[in-house]
Amino acid sequence: MKNTDLIRKFTFFSDLQEEELGKIAAITIERNYKKNMIVFMEGEPGDAFYYIKSGKVKIFRTYEDGKEHTVHILGEGDVFGEVTLFSESSYPASASVYEDAVIGMIKNADMERLVTENAELSLKLIKILARKLFFAQQKIRDLAFNDVFARTAAQLLKLAGDYGKQVEKGLLIDIELSRQEMADMVGTTRETISRAISRFKKEKSIAEEKDRIIIVNVQKLKQWL
């Protein structure tokens, strides 16, 4: 597979033309990471953004007491760190490797140079970043207005969309997540997440098997939204 064909698979770059993709491929640095390796830390200068060719990456924040708060678990095709593009800002969160990964890195200075040379590419990237901002605003709205059961159901459905595998019992969320990591993603406590999971199991919306969640009834889970 050509590098341009690979890059086109990522949503962040999917609207770009072959020539534009070729220029991006030329400035991409690819690296192999082992589980638990740090990609960047919160507060470091944001000099590059990244995409995941394979594996998984955890985005997290660390509080003053040393506790970690998981923000996202990202997988193949996801882009991260792009918030620093065009902004000269620091990384607002940290990124570590959740599963062994191959990650492409694009230095912001190289991308910004490309953009200044190509007005059409500039406009496309602005539209892409605007869409990501819209989705971020939606998440803030959901945290403000949806109760914890609705947010938990929504997170399970999102994880199923990202990592779901069809099995005999239903849709298996094929990723290892602790209750605390789930709680961090939903914006609640571990105890509350456990109550929500128990409620969904009792109503037979979901089941658990070998520390993995299986969505047994998608429509019943969606009724919480």
Image (cartoon, rainbow, N blue to C red):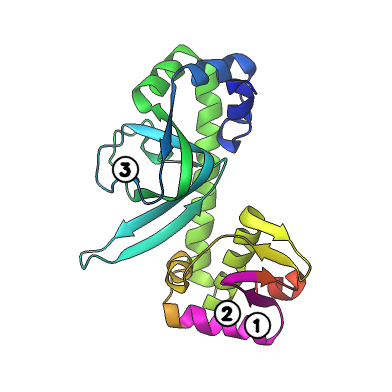
Task: Tell me the amino acid under the disc marked 2.
Answer: Ile
Q: Which mark is residue 197?
A: 2
- What residue span does the magenta drawing correspond to? 192-213
Q: Is residue 179 left or right of residue 163?
A: left
Q: Residues within 10 Å of mark 1 (few under 14, many from 20)?
A: some
Label 2 with label 3: CB-CB less than 8 Å: no
Going from the N terminus, do you reach mark 1 or mark 3 first? 3
Residue, far right: 168
Asked if residue 184 is positioned above or below residue 21 in the image, the reply reads below
| Separation of marks 1 and 3 at Cα, in angstroms | 37 Å
Question: Which residue is at the front of the view, 80 or 29?
Answer: 29
Classify the position of the C terminus by image quarter: bottom right
Calculate the distance from the C-alpha at mark 2 to the C-alpha at mark 3: 32 Å
Which dot marks residue 144?
none
Q: Is residue 209 magenta?
A: yes
Give the percent coordinates (x, y) of residue 138.
54, 57
Q: Report the quarter where the N terminus lies.
A: top right
139 drawn magenta: no
SS at mark 1 in the image: helix
Q: Which residue is mark 3?
A: 40
Residue 111 vs 78, above or below: the answer is above
Residue at horizontal 45 percent and vertical 71 percent from the top: 183
State the image quarter where residue 14 is shown: top right
Residue at 76 percent across and 71 percent down: it is: 169
Tell me the tag on residue 201.
1
Question: What residue type is disc 3 on?
Answer: Phe
Q: Is residue 212 left or right of residue 104?
A: right
Residue reaching furthest left?
Answer: 64
Going 54% across and 41% down the picture, which residue do you hit? 54
